[in-house]
Amino acid sequence: SAPVARATRAERVTPAADNPYEGRGLAGLRAWVAEVAALTTPDSIHWCTGSTAENYELTRQAVADGSLLQLNPEWRPNSYLARSAASDVARVEARTFICSADEAEAGPTNNWREPSALRAELEGVLAGSMRGRTLYVVPFSLGPVGGPLSLIGVQLTDSPYAVLSMGIMTRTGDRVLDQIAAGTPWVRTLHSLGAPLEEGQADVAWPCNDDKYIAHFPDTREVISYGSGYGGNALLAKKCVALRIASVIGRDEGWLAEHMLLIRITSPEGNRYHVAAAFPSACGKTNLAMLRSSRPGWRVETLGDDITWMKPGADGRLWAINPEAGFFGVAPGTGEATNRTAVETLWGNTIFTNVALRDDGDVWWEGLTETPPAHLVDWRGEHWTPDAGRPAAHPNSRFTVSASQCPTLAEGWDEPVALDAIVFGGRRATNVPLVTEASDWANGVFFGATISSEKTAAAEGTVGELRRDPFAMLPFCGYNMADYWAHWLRVGRTLSPAGTPKIFQVNWFRKGEDGSFLWPGFGENMRVLEWMVRRIERSVPAAQSPLGLVPAPGDLNVDGLDVAPDALAELFAVDRESWLAEAQLTEDFFDTFGTRVPAALRAELAALRYRLRQA
Ligand code: GTP
Ligand code: SPV
Ligand code: MN
């Protein structure tokens, strides 16, 4: 097994004394639940066991009360559609807070709030907020229960939808309670929809509140979320714990919590390689994680599609797991031609959110089929025809499904794997080449730190706007981003030279003058992975570009590919003037972090400018 071990309590930075509940076993958990119940005043408390019978009963109730719509079991067995409130469709970054004691520790990219002040504000809104509802206690494990890189927590929530989704996305239930009883440290997360029900008041299908808070207390490893029932705002194990809180724990314990997919590539020779890749939200992680190779003999298997934790092992390699147990994937654009593996994964046992409903009781979204059905009920519940002039599914509509249903799930997927490569990418219509290889770890960290990407529908805001999204972690890093870069550099120094993963940058989204994508993407991305593997194997040399190493002429296999030679040239074109302008923007960006920016990254920027200025 992998030479990685979990930090012991003694190695943890947070002393148990800071947390009045931790280390007291179930008594500590019960004390916290009682305190939250006294504040939020639910009608009842339900301790989730994670059993099939419980899942059945919760689902039955949700269908009965109209919060879930059962799909036609003939087409989609045990599958459901949830339609959210129109105002609650994505992560709310402006209402996401990092409440470290010291403002500078949260850094300029996070919204900081003074912890005790925000705690007091939250106590105000939480008071009585679960009236008329049930408080569910959901113990969860990120990573296999008791695994070497695993972390456990508990989510308290008044949302049955969150309970059912957490049951898919994480390992839940009694076996986690056993861990708490045994004294394992755990993370507290509290979630309220902020929609109390008065005596006799009828409920709505998607309760929520216009006032939202997604608050993180990194010093006490704690999350409080109020007002939203959607995705990363409400399934607190996911972005809140597995990224924002875990990134802080990783900083303190010497590991990394990343917004990355995780795959295994098998070459025609039968050699296996493990690759983690960070792309911003809705920029292709699930698709690459489920890639169907267009190249004979090459195979990709899925380990994870959104989050990867990685820790240096005693052997000098970087060991990785996917801490999740399911996929919360973007529906639009998922079809037979783009991601057949996802389509097959979704055969049943799936919760769909904000997709369209077909007349035959099945689901549909833009891109599932080329031609839309003649009539649908759209994500808002309104009649829809192809001439409606608006999408039938919300652009951030999603599916929630167990990883176990994925036909390409890698054997032993929940065991740690040693990484051979790390990939960074973004959605860039211009400038960024199809693939570039970093010269070393520090150069790769510079790639990660300088990602910019066009905004997508995964968060509220203007779609298409270019923004910096370092390591695809802009919305997910629980501490100062510049300290996080320093941490990456530090982790790199603990790896052995041979055990250090190669780092690459990719961009599947470059566009030609006519506005269409220059690269076919999806299964054809295998060609880029193939080149990476040949580089890992040291079986091909690379060519130099000012940005880094690129495929030597002929080394990127484009046999049988419908890409014109000038399109290929355009995919790798480096416009020095635009790149010098980008370098200036990078400097401006670095300056927002002041002296915390690691000197190694300043040096990388200087070296890039030097290379760009050479004729
Ligand atoms: P999150 O779950 O939000 O973190 O998103 P993600 O990174 O997993 O993105 P996902 O794979 O769901 O892709 C988002 C969108 O990008 C979908 O509409 C895809 O069809 C599209 N997409 C993914 N890969 C490619 C590609 O190689 N080329 C092009 N043109 N589009 C792609
Ligand atoms: C993302 O936005 O990166 C997602 C969806 O994966 S959410 O869980 O809402 O964060
Ligand atoms: Mn994501």
Image (tube, rainbow, N blue to C red):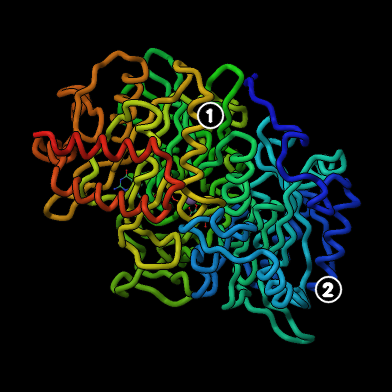
- Name above or below for residue 205 compared with residue 266: below
Q: Which mark is residue 43?
A: 2
User: Can I make out residue 76 in this image?
Assistant: no
Q: Is disc 2 placed on a helix, strand or loop?
A: loop
Q: In the image shown, does 155 or 292 lie closer to the viewer?
A: 155
Q: Which residue is mark 1?
A: 410
Q: Position of residue 335 (x, y in %)?
A: 38, 49
Q: Amino acid at mark 1?
A: Ala
| Towards the viewer: 59 or 100 | 100
Residue pictured at 70% horizontal, 60% vertical? 59
Q: Dividing the image into 4 quarters, which one contains the C terminus?
A: top left
In this view, 112 is above or below 203: above
Q: Quadrant of residue 174?
A: top right
Cα distance between the residues tagged 1 and 2: 43 Å
Q: Does the rendering let one see residue 475? A: yes
Q: Position of residue 316 (x, y in %)?
A: 54, 19
